[in-house]
């Protein structure tokens, strides 16, 4: 097969009750096959596998992640593509939290697994399923190098002034309390893509990247290096999100515990699952939210106002952090598809040289697009993110740097025999 000539990467993103995967061509950039395992551990699971334009669906019970990944590999065998023919050179795993330990992708061994496990208290919802995915995939695909790419790695460069919370130093140090930032793979990919699309050197560009999905984060990127980001020790801080509150006075939590009788778990559930747009308007899908706004729903109108106000506040703050902004870029589900949010977020910033051309902005953007008017001193762009491709490319680079060049077929039991052509 053509895509087997230079090898492919199986990218696995293992969540608490789901596994998303893509077989990626890291050179051409396309997804050869992709799929999703949902409702792991429930009475009826769901496995979807898409290849060559056809989607195959199974609804058998998926008792655990091992069963889920086995079902995926069975579909590769049954429906295609054949993984041996696809010449899988690496399995790339997304891990949310790399702490202060991991600043770049690493090849998985038992020590790496132990280190990730030790970081689990920093991301108790995400790290255990991330690790399960890695362990199961290593058992089922033992002959291929496995590479972990960390969501936090891009933000390891944050200046101490940006990464440090103003709490007792000893407490912070003892419990690893600092700003880690998340969505790093996306922020890094998008800021790099902007430079390539514009034909400019990444080192010459100051960018504000707005990753707006159900989770949302902003970053300030100076010359390709992250200098500030909105998510903090966890993905809860910063912008208003689908179900997460973003910034909130910490004393609100103390108040709710003391006066509303809420436990730590109650407050955790409130801030992560019952806040954001969902908490304000009962709806965290922007398509539905806009329908409610058009129908005059006051809660929905306020929710959109709050969302946009917070976004604009961060754009202004990051303008001050950077001093000069060459590009503001929108990405991810909302950023790529919602022209109302894009236009409203930058409304009234013309005096700063920032504006949106309504015609250029209209509709969903599947390709990198400039949406600012010609006169604006700051370019505004929409650039679709591709975290799977970013993970695949980082995995290949990591494997090659470790001396696995010419990694042989997944079916060949000796991938470490580098030195093949």
Image (cartoon, rainbow, N blue to C red):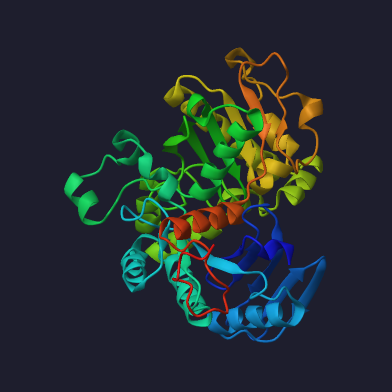
Q: Going by the image, does 308 lie left or right of 166?
A: right
Residue at 43 percent across and 35 percent down: it is: 225
Percent of width and height locating residue 129: 48, 71
Left or right of 36 in this view: 167: left
Q: Nearer the viewer, residue 5 or 310?
A: 5
Residue 322 visible, this angle? yes
When the figure is inspected, residue 314 is found, relative to residue 85, above or below; the finding is: above
Q: Is residue 316 above or below residue 396?
A: above
Circle count: 0
Q: Residue shown at 72%/16% (left/top)?
A: 374
Q: Position of residue 278 (x, y in %)?
A: 62, 53
Between 161 and 190, the one lying in front of the other is 190
Residue 258 location, x and y as percent?
34, 56
How far across and how far down the image is residue 144, in percent? 50, 72
Q: Which residue sits at x=48%, y=28%? A: 203
Tell me which corner region of the image, top left, top right, bottom left or bottom right, holds residue 350.
top right
Task: Classify residue 270 as left or right of residue 70.
Answer: left
The N terminus - image quarter: bottom right
Q: Please indicate whether residue 237 sits to the left or right of residue 373 in the image.
A: left
In which quarter of the view is residue 304 placed? Answer: top right
């Amino acid at each position: 097969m053509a895509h087997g000539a230079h090898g492919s990467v199986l990218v696995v993103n293992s969540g608490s009750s789901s596994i998303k995967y893509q077989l990626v061509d890291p050179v051409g950039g396309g997804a050869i096959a992709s799929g999703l395992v949902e409702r792991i551990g429930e009475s009826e699971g769901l496995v979807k596998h898409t290849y060559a334009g056809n989607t195959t669906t199974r609804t058998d019970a998926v008792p655990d992640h091992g069963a889920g990944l086995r079902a995926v590999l069975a579909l590769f065998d049954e429906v295609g593509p054949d993984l041996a023919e696809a010449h899988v050179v690496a399995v790339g795993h997304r891990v949310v939290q790399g702490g202060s330990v991991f600043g770049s992708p690493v090849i998985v061994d038992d020590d790496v697994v132990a280190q990730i496990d030790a970081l689990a208290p920093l991301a108790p919802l995400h790290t255990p399923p991330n690790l399960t995915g890695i362990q199961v995939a290593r058992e089922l695909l033992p002959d291929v190098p496995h590479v972990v790419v960390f969501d936090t790695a891009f933000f390891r460069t944050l200046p101490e002034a940006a990464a440090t919370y103003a709490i007792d130093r000893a407490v912070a140090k003892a419990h690893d309390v600092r700003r880690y930032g998340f969505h790093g793979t996306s922020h890094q990919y998008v800021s790099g893509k902007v430079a390539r699309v514009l034909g400019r050197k990444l080192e010459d560009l100051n960018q504000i990247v707005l990753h707006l999905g159900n989770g949302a984060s902003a970053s300030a990127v100076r010359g390709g290096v992250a200098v500030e980001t909105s998510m903090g020790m966890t993905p809860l801080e910063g912008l208003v999100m689908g179900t997460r509150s973003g910034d909130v006075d910490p004393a609100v939590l103390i108040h709710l515990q003391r006066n509303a009788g809420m436990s730590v778990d109650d407050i955790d559930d409130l801030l992560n699952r019952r806040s954001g747009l969902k908490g304000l308007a009962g709806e965290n899908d922007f398509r539905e939210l806009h329908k409610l706004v058009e129908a005059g729903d006051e809660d929905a109108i306020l929710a959109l106002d709050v969302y946009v106000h917070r976004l604009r506040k961060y754009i202004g703050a990051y303008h001050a952090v950077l001093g000069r902004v060459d590009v503001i870029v929108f990405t991810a589900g909302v950023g790529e598809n919602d022209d109302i949010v894009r236009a409203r977020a930058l409304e009234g910033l013309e005096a700063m040289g920032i504006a949106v051309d309504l015609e250029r902005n209209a509709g969903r953007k599947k390709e990198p697009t400039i949406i600012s008017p010609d006169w604006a001193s700051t370019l505004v762009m929409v650039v679709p993110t591709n975290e799977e491709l970013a993970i695949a490319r980082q995995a290949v680079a990591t494997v090659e740097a470790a001396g696995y060049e010419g990694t042989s077929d997944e079916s060949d039991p000796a991938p470490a025999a580098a030195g093949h052509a």
